[in-house]
Image (cartoon, rainbow, N blue to C red):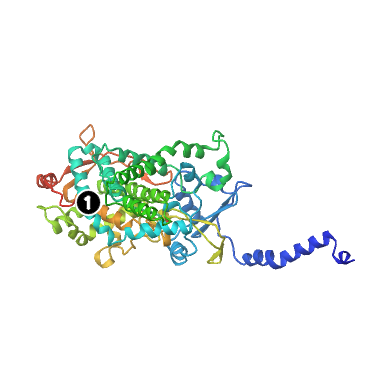
Amino acid sequence: MAILAFPPPTVLTLLVAVAFLVVYAVPRVFGKRKYRQPPGPPGEFLLGHYRKIPFVAAFKQYAKWAKEYNSDVLYFETFGTKWIVLDSLKASVELLDKRGANYSDRPNFVLFEEMGWAPTLTWLRWGPQMHRHRKILQPAFSKAQVRQYQDNQQKQALLCLRSILDDPGNWNLAVRRFAVAIVLNIAFGVDVDGPNSPWIKIADDAAEAISNSGAPASSILDRFPATRYLPAWLPFMERLRYARKWRWAIKAITDLPFNQARQEIDEKIVRKCFAHDRLTIYNANAEKGVANDFTMDDIRGASAAIYIAGNDTTATTVILFVLYLMQNPHVQAKAQAEVDRVVGTDRLPTWDDIPNLPYLNLVLQETYRMNPLSPLGIPHAALHDDVYNGMFIPKGTIVYQNVWSMHHNVAVYADPATFYPERYLSKNEGGRGEPLPVGNFGFGRRVCIGRSLAENSLMAILVNIVATMQIEYPLDKDGKRTPFEPEWSFRGQSHPLPFPASFSPRSAKAEELLRNASFTGSSHSK
Ligand code: HEM
């Protein structure tokens, strides 16, 4: 009889559905309705915005939409993957810095997973493994800690300039060697012998694989992860073919130096470097029977992060600096005058000179502003639902920062396409009082850990270039120096394609100083 007291199944289903609506769905849906979705262009049926985002220079299209929709937050969605693009510094600081606890996740980088990355901080989701990587890496690159690398940075800067003296046509390679030599030594204690070192080729191959892979987490594999299981030969699976084609390059940069470090440790060759330090701790724990929460794979990924994240970024910034000095001789002359005033012309610059070179620092800042290397940043992701300026940002939303757009916003930077370091000087000093660029090293709790190291490397080489070299357009066949604009690649990372530049010593004395420079500093490994 008791059974008869239960309502029939259809009524029961109805009751459960009503209860669900009252308790769960209605408050959520209507609660969110209070807030609007950030604006953005309309998507297509089923595909959403997938086909609307250009693969090349997406940041320029996003900047146009921000103007068109008059919003510094834009919303997009494809196959259930949601992303927003922040177009202003205000929105980036508000969300990524001030509400950093909510925006410190990363999306899954499926394309990069297909490329075979080891656990690398840059791509790790928010969680215990990411915290372990950041806790181990970040202190090693603090402002105070990176001073220990200054001797080697100075030495590598001078070796670079000597190499340019001997072979000016290959200045580009000398710059790449400079950047690789610094981070490879810190990560693996390895010295880069010369421009033909295989370590430079390994770094260049990986940089090419990464920099042409599109804005991070934007491929069809990232937007619709199930597609990674489709056959790669399908016409629309070009990105999967790309990832697999370049797997060897990522494997080489993550495995080769690490395997060498392990072998050295086995052979009791000890170097002062990140990989050896971590391997020694790992082995000591293992011998004592203590569990290692930083696994071999973690050490491999973290050491590779230093090598990968630190070489192409630094080299490309130097290459941009060369380009802008070549295109703006008056800026070069002003920087030279400052260095000559502070350093004189009968010695090379030292670290103590750097704080006395404010104009050179502004030239570097202007280099950052003109062309942020990751124009859309490395995306963060929201851990929880959030509301910003009445706009609803659901949990899991991927967050890009349009750093390029922030740095080229005419409301902040007058005439943004012009290279003009004086723009940051106050009006009293004859400038425009525009703010120094922010964002090219990222935001919040995922901000670049290598910034202090990078800025030291950059100042070490820039001051020496300015002190000793004259950079000009190369002579053409008619003996003229004709200005040109190099070609650019905007297929993910933003950088100029290799271009010629003429380097010549500023004076016989400058050449003599470079040739006779003795290195008080030795590599960190020695
Ligand atoms: C001019 C040079 C450099 C630039 C422009 C640069 C830029 C960036 C940017 C934009 C990010 C993403 C930050 C974010 O998500 O908010 C980042 C992250 C990172 N950078 Fe750099 N970087 C440079 C040099 C270096 C160097 C020398 C190292 C070497 C230690 C390094 C290591 C890293 C690492 C490990 C991350 C990942 C941080 C995380 O996800 O928690 N970077 N960098």
How many callouts does the rendering have? Answer: 1
Where residue 103 sits in the image (x, y, percent)? 48, 61
Q: Quadrant of the N terminus?
A: bottom right
Neighbor class of circle 1 (other Cα within 10 Å; few <14, some 14-19, many 20+) is: many
Q: Quadrant of residue 39?
A: bottom right
Decide: is 196 above or below 436: above
Amino acid under disc 1: Asn
Observer-nearest of 43 and 462: 462
- Residue that label 1 marks: 152
Q: Quadrant of ligand 1?
A: bottom left
Where residue 507 sits in the image (x, y, percent)? 11, 46
Q: Quadrant of residue 141?
A: bottom left
Where residue 393 sits in the image (x, y, percent)? 55, 61
Which residue is most to the front?
288
Residue 136 in sight here: yes
Where residue 74 sits in the image (x, y, percent)? 52, 57
Residue 330 in sight here: no
Viewed as shown, does residue 512 lie left or right of 189?
left
Decide: is 483 above or below 421: above
Viewed as shown, does residue 111 lie left or right of 12?
left
Q: Residue at x 22, y 51 (%)?
A: 152
Observer-nearest of 341 and 451: 451
Element type where label 1 sits in the image: helix
